[in-house]
Amino acid sequence: EAGVTQSPTHLIKTRGQQATLRCSPISGHTSVYWYQQALGLGLQFLLWYDEGEERNRGNFPPRFSGRQFPNYSSELNVNALELEDSALYLCASSKGAHGNQPQHFGDGTRLSIL
Amino acid sequence: RKEVEQDPGPFNVPEGATVAFNCTYSNSASQSFFWYRQDCRKEPKLLMSVYSSGNEDGRFTAQLNRASQYISLLIRDSKLSDSATYLCVVNQAGTALIFGKGTTLSVSS
């Protein structure tokens, strides 16, 4: 069974630019979650999508947005990039919409802002 | 009070040692509990779910105390490969999982 896949692996941007990160969940999983992990910090919850709908959102500004497609893959968009957006962005997927199932993570996208 | 609290460590133990990590959570409505493991600069990986009756998976034992809102992970006969950060994770229905900041374990020979 293929795991959660994320692309790109690395992304280098400059301040003010926009970044798009992509995630494909495990087959059969309908929920996709996005997290930010800055160096030395814990996972910070960003967004949760299920069946194409945003279910929950973490404490991040509106320039962090995303969407989920009919095939359950997802995009995370970050506008007006700032230096502190440099982090590992992790996508996870799970079965069901209750949020209480184990989540399985992709390898992440490492975003660097110069 | 933080939603999920863990002692960050590090816990430095020799091979073969038994080590225990604790975690407390603030929301009594939490329903699901997990331990994840994260290696340096890698993604978190599910180690085990935690059930009310306690559960064991090889050298790993997880316990849940709902009354005290406390979760534990016991690792017996530590291996070098157990060196990692262990994340305590809780959830209540309808919300996403909440991750603790993790406890770092270093096993040395």
Image (cartoon, coloured by chain):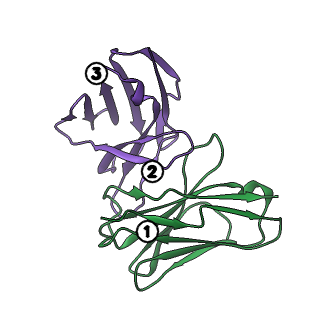
Chain colours: A green, B purple
Mark 2 or 1: in front is 1
Quadrant of the drawing holding the N terminus of chain A: bottom left
Q: Is residue B44 above or below residue B82?
A: below
Q: Amino acid at mark 3?
A: Arg
Q: Which callout, 3 or 1, points to the residue nearer the camera?
A: 3
Instruction: Residue at 30% x, 50% y: name it.
Output: B32
Q: Marks 2 and 1: CB-CB under 8 Å?
A: no
Q: Position of residue B93 (x, y in %)?
A: 33, 60
Side of A53 relative to B79 (left or right):
right
Evaluate if marks 3 and 1 touch, with contact meaning CB atoms under 8 Å apart.
no
* Residue A94: percent from left, percent from top: 35, 64
Distance from label 2 to label 1 (Cα)? 15 Å
Q: Which residue is mark 2?
A: B98
Q: Residue at x 31, y 25 (%)?
A: B75
Residue B80's tag is none
Label 1 Cα crowd, 10 Å radius (few <14 / some 14-19 / many 20+):
many
Q: Which mark is residue B76?
A: 3
The residue furthest left is B53
> What amino acid type is highlighted by mark number 1?
Val
Kind of element beneath mark 1: strand
Q: Compute the Cα span from label 3 to label 1.
A: 34 Å
Quadrant containing the C terminus of chain A in the rendered view: bottom right
The residue that label 1 is drawn on is A32
Residue in the image at 29% along x and 19% along y: B77
Q: Are marks 3 and 1 on the same chain?
A: no
Chain ID at mark 2: B
Residue at image location 38% in from the left, 80% down from the top: A51
Residue B17 image-quadrant placement: top left
Spot occupied by residue A53 in the image (x, y as percentages of width and height): 45, 80
Q: Chain of mark 3?
A: B
